[in-house]
Structures are given as structure tokens and as C-alpha cells.
Amino acid sequence: MFADESPVVAKREFGFSLNPNTQGELYTLFIYTVYQGEVVDSRPMRPGPYILQVSGIEESPANIESIDLFEEYGIKGCGPWGENGAVHVGLECRSINDLWKLRYRDALIPGQGLGWSAEEFTPSPRQQILLQAYRSPIHTHWHGPYFGKDAFRLLRDMQDPEWVRMYRGAS
């Protein structure tokens, strides 16, 4: 190794999959271990601790600096917020709650509205192409994994009504 080269090490990254998990949730949240763009290990997480760790409130191996990654990536309505001089901790995140809509067309959860998928249980081929822009080229299946800055970019884009219209129209 040359003096100006740093060693390549694995990183821990927040992310998600569009696969349902064993608890019946319609997506799965993870801390992934990523080496040279490929997921080599994964640790599933429940939404509450995931949101606390992404927002930097709870210690995390994927957020050692305790940065509010929601704020850093422009994702609104997730994590802590200030009101009347006090900081409140929010365990809700609409973008995370809406991940199921990328995969399903019909309402699978009462009161959650319809999904955005063009097909009943899977994104259309054109929607799958759109989703590829948010994954490492190594991972070609639309299920994921989605991790790091691209996963946060997808969560942010899901809050844009124009993006949702484009995704829904890609049938």
C-alpha cells in the first residue's frame, strides 16, 4: 500500500429492503455492513430505534457522529423537532411508513391509503428501473438493499408529490 492510500474498510450504513419481515411489516429496516458497495452483513431494526439512531439521538455504529441524518438529507417530519424552546423526539417518519407503497398497489393497512405500485404486489418494470437509481449497481433486484445516501435520497424524493406522480405513472 502506498502512503497516500487509505485502507478499504467496511462501513455501517442505514438502509432498508422492500421485503416484508417476519413481524408482518411490509418493509424491513437495517443497519447494513457495506464493503466496496456490497452488503456483507445486515442487522434488522424496529422503526423506533432506527429513527432515534438515524436522527442522532441514540448511539449507533452507523451514525458515530450523532448527526441528524434526516435533516442532513432534507427528509421532513422525521426525528426530533423544536417547539416552544423544547426539543421533542418523534418516532414517526412518514417516508419510512410509506415504503410499502413502492411495492404494493392496494391498501394493505387499513387507513393508510393506496400504494403507488402499478401492479398488485410488485413495482412495474418501469418502476423497477426508477428504483435502480437508488441502489448500488451490484444489487440489481428491486427488493433492495437500499442503503446510505441513496436510501436517504429515496426517502426524501418520496416526499415530493411530483416524484410520486412520476413513479405512479411509470406503469
Image: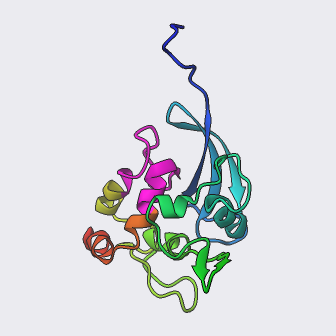
Q: State which quadrant residue 122 falls in.
A: bottom left
Task: Report the number of numbered marks.
Answer: 0
* Vertical side of 5 occupied by 124: above or below: below
Residue, far bottom: 111
Q: Is residue 147 magenta?
A: yes
Relative side of 128 to 52, left or right:
left
Q: State which quadrant residue 171 falls in.
A: bottom left
At a point 65% along the width and 50% down the height, the residue shown is 31
Q: Is residue 109 magenta?
A: no
* Vertical side of 8 occupied by 111: above or below: below
- Front residue of this view, candidates 62 and 108: 62
Residue, far front: 85
At a point 39% along the width and 72% down the height, the residue shown is 117
- Front residue of this view, candidates 68 and 7: 68
Q: Where is residue 130 shown, x and y percent of the image?
A: 32, 58
Pick the quarter of the image with the N terminus: top right
Relative side of 54 to 36, left or right:
right
Q: Where is residue 3 shown, x and y percent of the image?
A: 52, 9
Question: In the rendered structure, which segment of residues is drawn in magenta?
Answer: 131-154
* Vertical side of 40 occupied by 103: above or below: below
- Front residue of this view, candidates 72 and 115: 72
Q: Where is residue 161 shown, x and y percent of the image?
A: 32, 77
Relative side of 130 to 110, left or right:
left
Q: Where is residue 143 shown, x and y percent of the image?
A: 50, 56
What is the basis of the colouring in this image? rainbow
At a point 35% along the width and 51% down the height, the residue shown is 133
* Vertical side of 63 occupied by 121: above or below: below
At a point 43% along the width and 51% down the height, the residue shown is 150
